[in-house]
Image (spheres, rainbow, N blue to C red):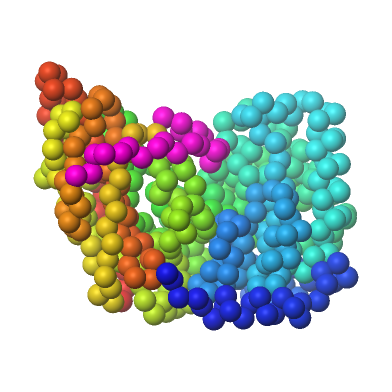
Amino acid sequence: MRKMSLVRIIMPLLVLFAFSTSSAQAIKVEVKQVDGNWQLFRGGEPYYIKGAGGLGYMEEVVERGGNSIRTWSVDDAQEVLDKAHELGLTVMMGLWVQHERHGYDYDNEAANKAQLEYFTKMVKKYKDHPALLMWSIGNEVDLFYSNTKVWNVVQDIAKMIHEVDPNHPTNTVTAGLDEKEVELIMQNAPDIDIYAINTYGEVGIIRDKIRASGWTGPYIIAEWGPNGHWEVAKTKWSAPIEQTSREKADSYFKRYNTHIYPDQEMCIGSYVFLWGQKQETTATWYGLFSNGGQSSEVLDVVERSWKGEWPENRAPSMDSLSLDGQQKGDDIYLIAEEMYSANVFVSDDSNDKLKYVYKIYPESTNTKAGGDLEKEPPAMTGLIKKNSGETVTFKAPKEEGPYRLFVYVNDSEDRLAYANIPFFVNPRDKDMPQSTPVKMKTRELAIPE
């Protein structure tokens, strides 16, 4: 059982003394240029966003050194704002603008009007909450879209906010950064104060690209994290190859400390993704926590980046995983119902006792786009035959098709390292294809001690 932190003990007591938010006054937030650098100010004081994208584990945002959370909609907004305020966090409140890819028609003026009226009510309802940091108008409405009228609708919402709520700036979030979209937003949505970008493997080029696009105002990295599942190498059967938790930790460290934080001229902060867990391609791809609530080694890197120091006890680190003598990234073919072994190499800075859990899943077929809800495939049973820690022996599944072997390694404080390796099962009577190594990128950066 993980030890209870001081924050978790004290915060419930502070709630008893928190003043009523129904009578609270808004804290003014604004963006200004100071000596040529864009800065966010809250209550007259500089405020650099060390943000987490997600609504779970808010206490841990505080523990790890963060100061803000991001939502994508106003669902449960009162509860979210109140809890954030109790913890001393701010909220970038999302207004979920409908997506063309979900069937919304931006030529339907009646629908546009109804959407605007709804958002007007929401802005009026929450604009004076002291935890509110800014309004985020739409998330990736540009994904697979064709009707650029969406930016006129975004402008109508942003203009309304400036009229109704003079205390909080606006942003809109795009999927990556495209120069044409920057032009469209500058031209059609001039009431957008801050450009916000969801970016993963391309975070390193945003600094130069946003300047080349002509945007001269402040920007936020609204989501950032590991290499996206669309950005990585794939097996011959099109299974994307996921980074291990150690490889993700390396890339998170580099992305924040080399690309995001150093742009003090225009970047006013960021929201790391995902502060929680979800099934998206796999159950581990984006979450900084497991579905059981264990924190991964990536979270230690986030804490080091935000606070400048490591946690007292760091999570175990996943160095490598091999299957039948082949490495993650190889095209690995197994024979149905044959026995195989896999080996994992893990280190732990505190020499904690480690617990190894192995699971086999069929490759997910319920994949979506843009973070839409996916269903996790069930783990297969009866295949793991011997678990001796760093080595596991298992029987290949009976049915032909693609699978993944997952390994989860927990320390005594329920911190986690993980990896998975895709493989393909062929029936006994079928000629086996030759396994082919896939050239993988080396680690981006060794994490400092």
> Percent from the top left, x then y, of residue 26?
82, 69
Question: What's the residue at 72%, 53% (across, down)?
Answer: 76
Question: What's the residue at 64%, 38% (across, down)?
Answer: 141
> Percent from the top left, x then y, of residue 34?
66, 74
Picture quarter containing residue 164? bottom right
- Left or right: residue 417 versus residue 273 is left
Picture quarter containing residue 10? bottom right
Picture quarter containing residue 330? top left
Quarter of the image containing the C terminus? Answer: bottom left
Of residue 155 and residue 114, the one placed in the foreground of this image is 114
Look at the image and give the residue range highlighted in magenta.
365-385
In the rendered structure, does residue 377 fall within the stretch colored magenta?
Answer: yes
- Left or right: residue 120 versus residue 385 is right
Question: What's the residue at 81%, 58% (across, down)?
Answer: 126
Of residue 290 and residue 220, the one placed in the foreground of this image is 290
Quarter of the image containing the N terminus? Answer: bottom left
Task: Report the magenta stretch's main SS.
Answer: loop
In the rendered structure, does residue 99 fall within the stretch colored magenta?
Answer: no
Q: Is residue 250 visible?
A: no
Question: What's the residue at 39%, 66% (across, down)?
Answer: 414
Residue found at the far front of this picture: 382
> Percent from the top left, x then y, of residue 418?
32, 55
Q: How many marks?
A: 0
Q: Is residue 346 visible?
A: yes
> Percent from the top left, x then y, of residue 337?
17, 31
